[in-house]
Image (spheres, rainbow, N blue to C red):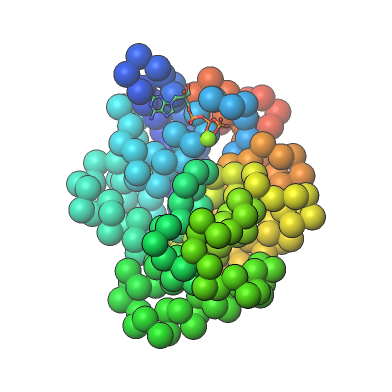
Amino acid sequence: MSIITARDVTLSFGQTPALRGASLTVEAGEVLAVMGPSGSGKSTLLHCLAGILTPDDGEIHFDGRRLDTLDETARSALRRDTFGFVFQFGQLVPELTAEENVALPLLLHGVRRTAAVRAAREWFPRLGLDGLERRRSGELSGGQAQRVALARGLVARPRVLFADEPTGALDSLTGEHVMDLLVDSAREQGTTVIVVTHEPRVAAYAGREVVVRDGKVHSLAGEPVGS
Ligand SMILES: Nc1ncnc2c1ncn2[C@@H]1O[C@H](COP(=O)(O)OP(=O)(O)OP(=O)(O)O)[C@@H](O)[C@H]1O
Ligand SMILES: [Mg+2]
């Protein structure tokens, strides 16, 4: 059963076309890798699927509902309650400690502070982050911050996790460990994962790979992906 469908999505930033008729169907529970050259439109596609950006044209459906025509209030509720994110850049709140950053989605769900922080802390040993719970993001290495962001993306057991190069700052061993955890958590929690990556080794963890080229989605074999 499909959970997300994009049909002929186009989006330009001023004169720069980022998506030129991108179509994609994502099955519920699958781990999908999105690959493709720098600047091809991967992040833009992810942001459209997640309701962060609104396409100029085309349609996006989530769980049988039209997503791209929802108003901002409805879309932000969906992002808060249903989706998890690991963004490509600058994602932790610098004023908060690592554990507070991870607890954030739970707090937004109305979980009490003590319970939210307790649940957040459980992720630290799993991600090799023992002892870093109270650090602020400026006191973490790039790879540590990335793992904190991953924990934050998963902590609220989202239906869909959108992860934009979640292993970009990690060495290959840590990257593999993180992908193991991502795939295991997805299976355990029934989370659908859409992961953008440049690394074939990371993509190998996914059940399926697609390639974005010039703002369109292709299968690994090079065929355009229909919806
Ligand atoms: N906010 C923006 N304003 C203007 N142009 C943008 C903006 N965001 C992206 N673009 C342009 O849209 C195109 C697609 O960008 P996008 O970030 O989706 O690429 P990407 O595939 O994620 O690349 P990378 O692998 O480098 O992260 C690029 O030409 C980029 O320069
Ligand atoms: Mg990108």
For the view shown, which residue lies furthest in the bottom direction? 114
Q: Quadrant of residue 126?
A: bottom right
Residue appearing at x 41%, y 33% in the figure = 7
Most foreground residue, 76 or 216: 76
* Horizontal and vertical percent position of residue 221: 70, 28
The image shows residue 61, relative to residue 58, as above or below, that is below
* Horizontal and vertical percent position of residue 201: 77, 44
The image shows residue 118, relative to residue 207, as above or below, that is below
The image shows residue 181, relative to residue 27, as above or below, that is below
* Horizontal and vertical percent position of residue 12: 36, 22
Residue appearing at x 62%, y 30% in the figure = 36
Horizontal arrangement in the rendering, residue 140 relative to residue 77 (left or right): right
Q: Quadrant of residue 193?
A: bottom right
Q: Is residue 27 visible?
A: no
Horizontal arrangement in the rendering, residue 101 relative to residue 184 (left or right): left
Residue appearing at x 74%, y 60% in the figure = 177
Residue appearing at x 57%, y 23% in the figure = 213
Most foreground residue, 192 or 76: 76
* Horizontal and vertical percent position of residue 27: 54, 51
